[in-house]
Every structure is written in structure tokens, then in C-alpha cells.
Amino acid sequence: MPTPTDDVRSDLEDTFSGPNLLYFAAAGWSTGAMVLSGADRAARAEFDRHIDMEAGNEVANLGGYLVPGIVTPTIWLVGLATHDRTLAGAGSAVIESMLVTVTTMSAMKVVTGRAWPMAEDGIDHSMEFHPFLNGIAAWPSGHTATTTTIAAALTAYYPEHWWIPAIGYPLAAYLGVGMMDRNSHWASDAVAGMLLGQAVGYSIGRNFRRRVRGIAGTADSLVVAPLSDGTGLAVSGTW
């Protein structure tokens, strides 16, 4: 039966190379753009003035812990209990994706040390980063990263089931909005969390699909080459 530790080295190599590098770069670029343009500050002000999800933001906060905590082990355990190799493979993909996402996310939080929103003191903290000095800081959002990685892993593993992304990705977005509403994250934290979760989850889910379900896929590739006139670079890839 499949386990979450099957071919971990290969999964990690695929996760942190090739086209996935574009997702990680986008997480950084989008945050930089939203911080420097004032979009984070503006979004925070909009929520403070006009948006109040009331109990909805607490549901989002709790859901960000319960969904990963329940879904992650349950799929694998049910697969093992029913001797369903395909379902056990899906659970293995989700567990490995979750472990890689949480580890990566935690490292990013410590390294960047982004300040949490603190509306009560009336000071704008959106541009504050304290590398290695703020513990498990705000960036990126763990709620959106972990929920997105589950949705991405299962979407890649079961591409024939349209309802998985139809439910999973909106749920991740809802959690991100809820965390913004309760003043727990900046908008760019949520965006970066979803990009991180997508990169990790989809890559690992696709690899488990190939191994467990025996469905071949096109090998990843990322090519960066200068344009013929020397005026720039062209990026092309398959994934």
C-alpha cells in the first residue's frame, strides 16, 4: 500500500525545481507589489471600515485548523482500512504535501519575520519585516497554504473529479478572507499562501498519481533562453 514517505526525495526535487520556481517567485513578487503599492494597507482599511463577517471569520479561523487536521490523515487511514490502494495513494499525497508545506511555510515565516496586522494601535505595520526576530510570523498565511495544498494535491491526483477544485479552492480563498477580516493576516499573506500550497500540493499529487495510479504524464521542463534579437529572455515550459 502507498505511504506518505514513498519516493520523498524525488517529490522534493520536483517540488523545488522547474516551473514550480515560478510559483515561489510569484509569492515574493506579489507580496512586494502589494506592500510597496499600498494594496495591503488599503485592503486592511477596507475590511476595518466596511466588511464584517462576524462569526464567519471565527469559522474560517477554526476551519483552517480542522480541515487539514481531519482531512489529511482520514483519507489515508480510510484507504488503508478498506485496502483501497488508490485512496491510500491520495491520502499519502495529501500527508506528504501537508508536511512539506508546513515545513516550508514555517521557514518562510521565520526568515521574513513579517509583522502581524495590529489595528488597535492605529499604526500601519504592513511594511514591517523583522527577519529571524519575529518567530512564526505572518507571511505567508498558513490557513490558505495548508488548505490550498490539500485541494491541489487531490486535484492533481484525481483530475477527473471536477468537484474537488470547485470546492477546495473557494474554501481556501474563504479562509484567507476570513483571516483578513479577523485582522490576522494581510491580503498578500493569503495570496502567497495559496501560491505556496499550489506549487507543493499539485507537484506531489501529480507524482503520486503517476506512481500509484500508473498514469503517465509529460515530464516537467523549464527553459529560459535569450531572444534572437538580444532584447530579453523567453521562458517556456511544460508541467
Image (cartoon, helix red, strand yellow):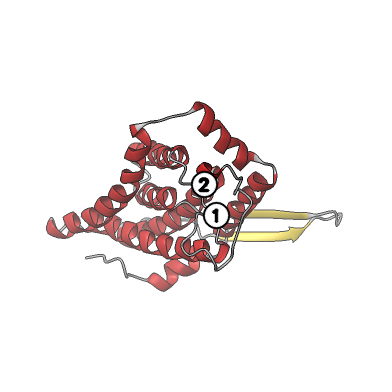
Give coordinates of residue 83: x percent, y percent: 14, 59
At horizontal 85% and vertical 54% (from top left) the residue drawn is 231
What residue would you read off at disc 1?
115
Categorize mark 1 by other alpha carbons within 10 Å: few (<14), some (14-19), many (20+): many
- In the image, 233 versus 97, the foreground residue is 97
Which corner quadrant of the image does residue 230 belong to? bottom right
Categorize mark 2 by other alpha carbons within 10 Å: few (<14), some (14-19), many (20+): some
At horizontal 57% and vertical 42% (from top left) the residue drawn is 122
Q: Secondary structure at mark 2?
A: loop
Q: Amino acid at mark 2?
A: Met
Which corner quadrant of the image does residue 84 belong to? bottom left
> Mark 2 or mark 1: which is in front?
2
Q: Are marks 2 and 1 in contact (CB under 8 Å)?
A: yes
At horizontal 56% and vertical 31% (from top left) the residue drawn is 46
Q: Is residue 48 above or below residue 125?
A: above
Q: Is residue 178 above or below residue 89?
A: above
- In the image, 143 versus 50, the foreground residue is 50
Residue 216 visible in the snapshot: no
- In the image, 51 versus 159, the foreground residue is 51
What residue would you read off at disc 2?
118
